[in-house]
Image: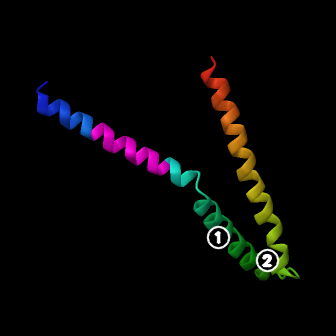
Amino acid sequence: MKEEDVRNSISAIQLRNKKVEAEKAWETSWQRTWLILSITYVFMVFFMNMIWVKWAYVNAMIPTFWFFLSTLSVGFLKSKYIEKYLSK
């Protein structure tokens, strides 16, 4: 390989790594979590109004809250899984 090809390959790898880091930062960001929670809440309010649930605005908080708890526990379980996987 020529020196220029090596430099281009390194630049491509560095660019890819930056993209992967940015995607990982988005996946674990609070902005993403709040966006998903907001969308979940709006959808649940809409759905509950469609099926005539009383106090839909209040009742929509229940599935939204449990979804939020599941996102917290998944992160914990993921870190335990990775820890166990890397110890093999």
Vertical arrangement, residue 47 with respect to residue 35, above or below = below
Is residue 20 rendered magenta in the image? yes
* Residue at point 68%, 31% (across, down): 81
What residue type is disc 2 on?
A: Met
The magenta stretch is: 12-23
Residue 13 image position (x, y, % from top left)? 31, 37
* Residue at point 58%, 61% (across, down): 32
Q: Quadrant of the rendered structure where residue 56 is?
A: bottom right
Is label 2 in a helix, a strand or a loop?
helix
Of the 4 image quadrants, the one containing the C terminus is: top right
Neighbour class for label 2 at 10 Å: few (<14), some, many (≥20)? some
Task: From the image, tell me which residue sits under label 1.
Answer: 39
Is label 1 in a helix, a strand or a loop?
helix
Callout 1 touching callout 2 (CB < 8 Å)? no
Residue 73 image position (x, y, % from top left)? 75, 46
Task: From the image, tell me which residue sits under label 2.
Answer: 48
* Residue at point 66%, 71% (across, down): 38
